Amino acid sequence: MPEIYNPDWRYANMTQTEIENHVKARSSQLMSQPHFVTNTDGKKLKFRVTDKDIEHLVDDALHRAKGVLFLSDIPVLPEYFPKAVYIKTEKDTKKHSKGVCFHYYQIDINGRSMYLNFRDDKLRHHTNLHSITVEIKKAVS
């Protein structure tokens, strides 16, 4: 089996906090302006990416989506937002989460398929890129 090139070799000897700071420094375009993805009926979802979101995405790249999402993908995510494909929307079922739902969109980066998870808080009028995962959990019925 051929070895997969890891573009994140430069982060090998850094702590997670050092990695987060390095990725944040390279993500000014991602954090400085609002972004949009479009659902199936043409409606646009406007969202922002904050420092905390970058920290969560770094954690996703190191753990939950390791090998699919690379740390070096995070600063260039805006290139892929226009091509994101809407999958579904689910209400947050946790207590104290009234008015919160999650929107899932699929993107492909260099043949690697992953899902963007947007947290939409309708009461606070705040939508952010919450996480990136390799698969979407099935709803428990």
Image: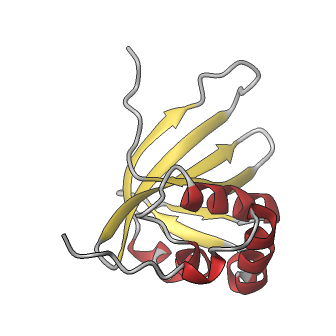
Front residue of 92/110: it is 110
Q: Residue furthest top?
A: 141
| Quarter of the figure with the C terminus | top left
> Which residue appears farthest toward the left when viewing the image?
1
Q: Residue at x 76, y 49 (%)?
A: 125
- Vertical side of 23 occupied by 51: above or below: above
Q: Residue at x 72, y 27 (%)?
A: 97
Q: Position of residue 10 (x, y in %)?
A: 62, 83
Residue pictured at 71% horizontal, 42% vertical: 121
Give x and y (percent) for residue 118.
Answer: 58, 52
For residue 14, above or below residue 90 = below
Residue 43 visible in the snapshot: yes
Between residue 5 and residue 33, name the one nearer to us: 5
At horizontal 81% and vertical 74% (from top left) the residue drawn is 21
Residue 113, image quadrant = bottom left
Residue 15 spot, x, y in % from top left: 76, 65
Colour mapping? secondary structure
Q: Quadrant of the N terminus?
A: bottom left
Q: How many marks?
A: 0
The image quadrant of residue 93 is top right
Residue 33 shows up from this direction: no
Q: Nearer the viewer, residue 38 or 138?
A: 138
